């Protein structure tokens, strides 16, 4: 079976993708799959590469690569040397805008290609934090109080919108991941600068009240049409919030698996995760994030292609259930047959 692992992309999460893809490639059972590696540069150019995992992780993969073009009608990739690559399954280990928001998924579907992950519609809706919150609210699941601002909107209008929201506030791009572009503000005077930062990543921005509670993540894995829901994982860190540097550069991040929360609350989170996965029409996999206060569960966001790095909660939670990284990849590949 030809398994094509694609990484990189024109996204703010390019480096995260390289690390995730490296971990995936390391854990693929090479005796079962013929692995083809395709990298997408920051500027959006596609290459077939023979680079090692180490070179991919350190962004030196283009030194051993050749450009490819996509033959949509044939559902294949063509190299400069005339090689034709028609994968049985594509594993797009890619995060962020332009690659996780339905754009890439639409391309694969136009090619008639089979791929791991949520489909076009689900990817687009889940990637938009505003739309996913609306779905959660329709499901009867609480979300933090928030307002929406749009690029080009007068700051005076935005200030009027946020009246009634309690400080501190998070100002975040509606369509971005890995906490890129997020600012926590404790003074409304800092709103304009925070909006400027967020609008670099998205034309729509959420301004939401900070929740004083525990941050909980839960993994969902589809297998033979049924859902495997992990235990809850709790994030532990010392920084002001779980920003990009804390996620990927800090050594002070810890985890409680299972989370140190009430059993009934944990069960409610699992039920909410299943409900959201189905309501958002997800498939294959997702990581869903919540806040937990003393007696309330609040939906934060959903990630349709969660990280697979050595510090990522998604594979760690499933490993605690007895599903090794190798087995996880096998299950993701096999599940493609069911949707």
Image: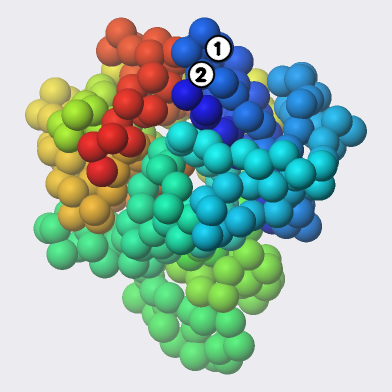
- Mark 2–mark 1 CB contact (< 8 Å): yes
Q: Is residue 141 left or right of residue 212?
A: left
Label number found at residue 30: 1
Task: Look at the image and tell me whether residue 304 can be seen.
Answer: yes
For the C terminus, give its image quadrant: top left
Q: Is residue 128 left or right of residue 142?
A: right
Of residues 151 and 19, which is closer to you in this image? 19
The dot on residue 122 is: none
- Residue positioned 49% across, 79% down in the render: 149
Q: Position of residue 262 (x, y in %)?
A: 17, 25
Q: Residue at x 49, y 90 (%)?
A: 157
- Asked which quadrant contains residue 27, the reply is top right
Q: Residue at x 58, y 82 (%)?
A: 151
Mark 1 crowdedness (10 Å alpha carbons): few <14, some 14-19, many ≥20: few
Q: Tell me which residue sits at (29%, 18%) in the image.
A: 258
Residue 29's place in the image compared with 37, above or below, is above
- Mark 1 element type: loop
Asked if residue 133 is positioned above or below residue 243 in the image, the reply reads below
The vertical placement of 136 against 213, above or below, is below
Q: Nearer the viewer, residue 51 or 241?
A: 51
Mark 2 element type:
loop
Find the distance from the CA under tag 2 to the CA under tag 1. 5 Å
Image coordinates for residue 279, horizontal then vertical, percent: 18, 55
Q: Is residue 255 left or right of residue 66?
A: left
Q: Which residue is mark 2?
A: 33
Does 89 sit above or below residue 43?
above
The picture places residue 170, in percent across and down from the top left corner, at 50, 59
């Amino acid at each position: 079976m030809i398994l094509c692992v694609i990484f990189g992309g024109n996204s703010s999460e390019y480096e995260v993708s390289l690390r995730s893809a490296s971990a995936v490639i390391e854990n693929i059972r090479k005796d079962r799959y013929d692995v083809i590696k395709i990298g997408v540069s920051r500027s959006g150019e596609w290459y077939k590469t023979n680079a090692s995992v180490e070179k991919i992780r350190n962004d030196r993969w283009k030194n051993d690569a050749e450009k490819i073009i996509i033959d949509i009608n044939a559902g294949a990739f063509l190299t400069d040397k005339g090689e034709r690559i028609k994968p049985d399954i594509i594993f797009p280990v890619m995060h962020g805008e332009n690659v996780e928001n339905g754009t890439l998924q639409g391309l694969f579907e136009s090619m008639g290609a089979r791929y791991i992950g949520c489909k076009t519609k689900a990817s687009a809706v889940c990637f938009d934090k505003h739309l996913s919150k609306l779905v959660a609210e329709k499901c009867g699941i609480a979300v933090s109080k928030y307002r929406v601002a749009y690029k080009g909107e007068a700051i005076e209008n935005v200030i009027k919108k946020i009246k009634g929201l309690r400080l501190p506030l998070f100002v975040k791009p509606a369509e971005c991941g890995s906490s890129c572009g997020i600012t926590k503000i404790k003074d409304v005077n800092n709103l304009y600068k925070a909006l400027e930062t967020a609008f670099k990543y998205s034309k729509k921005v959420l301004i939401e009240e900070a929740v004083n509670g525990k941050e909980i993540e839960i993994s969902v894995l589809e297998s033979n049409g049924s859902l495997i829901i992990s235990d809850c994982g709790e994030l532990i860190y010392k920084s002001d919030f779980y920003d990009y540097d804390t996620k990927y550069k800090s050594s002070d991040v810890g985890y409680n698996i299972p989370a140190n929360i009430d059993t009934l609350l944990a069960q409610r989170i699992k039920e909410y995760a299943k409900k959201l996965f189905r309501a958002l029409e997800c498939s294959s996999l997702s990581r869903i994030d919540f806040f937990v206060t003393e007696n309330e569960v609040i939906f934060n966001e959903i990630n349709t292609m969660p990280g697979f790095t050595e510090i990522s909660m998604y594979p760690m939670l499933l490993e605690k259930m007895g599903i090794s990284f190798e087995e996880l990849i096998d299950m993701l590949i096999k599940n493609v047959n069911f949707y």
